[in-house]
Image: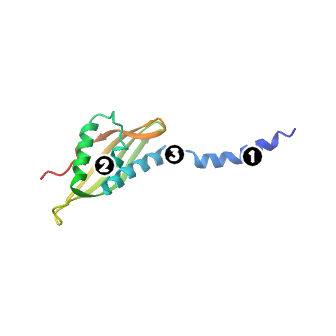
Amino acid sequence: MNCRFPLVWLLLLVPLIVCFAADPAQEVWDLLTEVASGLSERNPEAVLAAFDPAMPGYDQLRANVTALLRNAEVRSSIELESDEGDGESRSEELNWLLNIRPEQEATASTRRQQLVKCRLRRIGKKWRIVGFEPLAFLAAPDK
């Protein structure tokens, strides 16, 4: 019996497996860009799906996002400022920009730019945002 044949195949497959292994930083970035896209698409369900419902302030966040997207067009973009953590928890700082234009006021808009801090944790197989500061960043503008 030749034992080297399976070993050779295993050695050839290891680099391929490593290439397809999950990169926690990329997975988290993908989740955060889904939040930004959900805001731009006026899809509160997509935005809120990224958050852990057990997160402190989740009910306020849900109310903020729902009110923000109910009557306004939102353009959202994020830039990564810092990324720390491992395969189970991560801390992100984002330079987040929102351009908010109320439906009834075609020329009026609000520009909101801020450093947003997110804490994320892997829950089961998925990443979820478990901390978001400041919560008011995703609130509708004052009238």
Instruction: Report whether residue 5 is seen.
Output: yes
**Left-right relation of 34 to 63:** right
* x and y, in percent, of residue 19 in the image: 60, 49
* x and y, in percent, of residue 17 in the image: 63, 46
Looking at the image, which is closer to me, 73 or 89?
A: 73
Looking at the image, which is closer to me, 143 or 95?
A: 143
Count the numbered circles shown.
Answer: 3
Q: Earlier in the sequence, mark 2 or mark 1?
A: 1
Looking at the image, which is closer to me, 75 or 114?
A: 75
Query: In 3D space, how far apart are the residues under numbered discs 1 and 3 (Cα atoms)?
Result: 24 Å
Query: In 3D space, how far apart are the residues under numbered discs 3 and 2 (Cα atoms)?
Result: 27 Å
Which corner quadrant holds the N terminus? top right
- Reading the image, the residue beneath label 3 is 23
Question: What amino acid is at disc 3?
Answer: Asp
Q: Residue at x 49, y 38 (%)?
A: 125
* x and y, in percent, of residue 129 in the image: 37, 40
- Reading the image, the residue beneath label 1 is 9
Circle 3 SS class: loop
- Reading the image, the residue beneath label 2 is 44
Circle 2 SS class: helix
Q: Residue at x 71, y 48 (%)?
A: 12
